[in-house]
Amino acid sequence: MEDNERHLYDKFDSLIARHRVLIDHLCMHRALGDVNRCAELRQDCYISLWHYLPKLREDANQFHETAWVVWHCRSVFSHLRYRRRTHRFLPLDENIANTLGEPDDSHLRDTIDSLSTFLTSHEQRAFYLMSDGYSAKEIARELGIKHRSAVLLRHRIIEKLKHAIVNNKKYPS
């Protein structure tokens, strides 16, 4: 492998390592908690970032690099609305396949635990199920409630957490 090619792989690996959590959050938000859809979006984002990586300036600071990553992910999301998906997954170069592994989500679990303190115990049970990727139907089955109640419960949880974040409430420690 040439030095230039190796440099590109190293640059991609370090870019993904620095922004993996951000990309995961953007994809999960866009997928509305659907884990399978989130995985597809994440893969599309990685492919877009890989494709446009040579255009990222070498001297880009952290803010510019983060904005560049967000812009490309949001671009992927907006393009999905306007084109039909003829294939679910695009083939990836096997040299970057290891970079696309699932991240360690222990820090995400800490964030979920912090956010759950804003919720009632019933909402907390549903929130933990949501964070594990359960659909409203599965949440209803697990909690022994009606499907419509689970949908409303999910909506109420999201609204409470939005309100807490918008009003800059600190997570209770």
Image: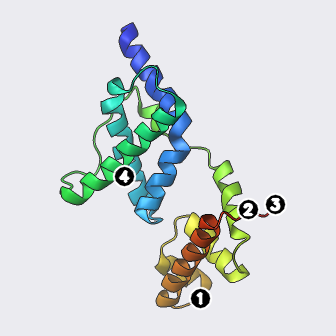
Find the distance from the CA under tag 3 to the CA under tag 1: 31 Å
Choose between 170 and 4: the one closer to the eye.
170
Find the distance from the CA under tag 4 to the CA under tag 2: 31 Å
Q: Residue at x 53, y 78 (%)?
A: 154
For disc 3, the neighbor class at 10 Å (few under 14, some 14 to 19, many from 20) is few
Question: Residue 32, image x and y in percent?
Answer: 44, 66
Q: Residue at x 40, y 25 (%)?
A: 95
Residue type, label 4: Glu
78, above or below 67, in the image: below
For label 1, the SS is loop
Answer with the quarter of the image where residue 157 lies. bottom right
Which residue is situated farthest in the right direction here?
173
Query: What's the mark number on residue 144?
Result: 1
Query: What's the mark number on residue 71?
Result: none
For disc 1, the neighbor class at 10 Å (few under 14, some 14 to 19, many from 20) is few
Lower sequence index among marks 3 and 1? 1
For label 2, the SS is loop
157, above or below 46, in the image: below
Q: Quadrant of the N terminus?
A: top left
Residue underneath mark 2: 171
Lower sequence index among marks 1 and 4? 4
Residue underneath mark 3: 173
Find the distance from the CA under tag 2 to the CA under tag 1: 30 Å
Verify CB contact (< 8 Å) between mark 4 and mark 2. no
Verify CB contact (< 8 Å) between mark 3 and mark 1. no
Find the distance from the CA under tag 1 to the CA under tag 4: 31 Å
Verify CB contact (< 8 Å) between mark 3 and mark 4. no
Which residue is situated farthest in the front direction here?
167
Residue underneath mark 4: 40
Q: Quadrant of the C terminus?
A: bottom right
Verify CB contact (< 8 Å) between mark 1 and mark 4. no
Between disc 1 and disc 4, the foreground one is 4
